[in-house]
Amino acid sequence: MWCGDQTLERAFPALYRIAVKREASVADVRLFSHGSYQWNILFSRDFHDCELSIVAEFFSSLYSTGTLVAQRDRLKWRSNNHKLCTVKAYYNILTTQDHTLFPWKNIWRSHVPFKVAFFVWGAALEKILNTDNLRKRGCVVMDWCYMCKKNGESVVHLLLHSEVTWVLWDEIFQMVDVAWVMPMRVVDLLGCWRKMQGCHQVATVWKMIPLCIM
């Protein structure tokens, strides 16, 4: 993690998948030409129109890193200011991690058809065959949402945060008079309702999930 707060693979997964040299070092792709440094990164295909904004953000991040000193690579601990690993810092990371239990009871013990429970299980694991997962398997498909035509079709976007999907969720919540803020992931949504299973309204919404996500 030398450019921003996360690796370039995580920050720009769509570009990482089409990069020719995914394990290239900075020295391999950073050239000094005409008095300045340039980035020479090769991709396996041309960019789609919907990817141009991502490409611009990617190169903007690279050129905003400033001067890189030519020296040997070394490890730095990013969890404190002095960049050194300590027992206290490592203990704080271990004790503050989210240990959310997988809500398997909400999935497999619910009174829904087996194929619906299987789909919810795959969605909670983010393993359904949406565009993002198909691209990770090497399928050449355009990385955009089929419904809203605006964002990449990740599992959480497709099932929770897409404009079209949210209209369906909003209708269901209004039917049972529930005010809800959608969490980031499907598994977090199921986990929230697992803790509120005594609420009749939430139980009603849980039974109507298949109507929304299918």
Image (tube, rainbow, N blue to C red):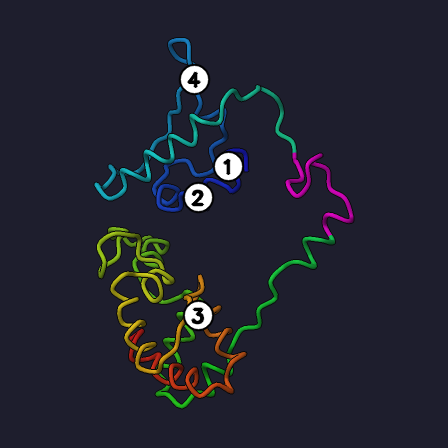
Cα gap from disc 1 to disc 2, whole angstroms? 9 Å
Please give the residue where the numbered disc 4 appears in the rendered image. Answer: 37
The tag earlier along the polypeptide, 2 or 3, is: 2
Pointer 2 and pointer 4: residues touching (CB < 8 Å)?
A: no
Q: Residue 11, labelled with which disc?
A: 2
Q: Which amino acid does label 3 sit on?
A: Ala
User: Residue 72 sits in which quadrant?
Assistant: top right
Q: Residue 124 carries which label?
A: 3
Disc 3 from disc 1: Cα separation: 29 Å
Q: Is residue 112 above or below residue 188?
A: below
Asked if disc 1 and disc 2 are in contact, CB closer than 8 Å, the reply is yes
Alpha-carbon neighbours of circle 2 within 10 Å: few (<14), some, or many (≥20)? some
Identity of the amino acid at label 1? Gly
Point out which mark residue 103 bears: none
Q: Is the magenta stretch mostly helix, strand or loop?
A: loop
Please tell me which residue is depicted at 53% across the width and 73% down the height of the picture: 102
Query: Where is residue 12 drawn, in percent x and y?
Result: 40, 43
Q: Nearer the viewer, residue 202 or 138?
A: 202
Which quarter of the rendering shows the C terminus?
bottom left
Q: Give the range drawn in magenta.
A: 75-90
The residue at 44%/43% (across/down) is: 11
- Residue under label 1: 4
Looking at the image, tell me whether mark 4 or mark 3 is earlier in sequence order.
Answer: 4
SS at mark 4 in the image: strand
Q: Badge 4 local density, few (<14 within 10 Å), some, or many (20+)? A: few
The CA distance from mark 2 to mark 3 is: 22 Å
Mark 1: which secondary structure? loop
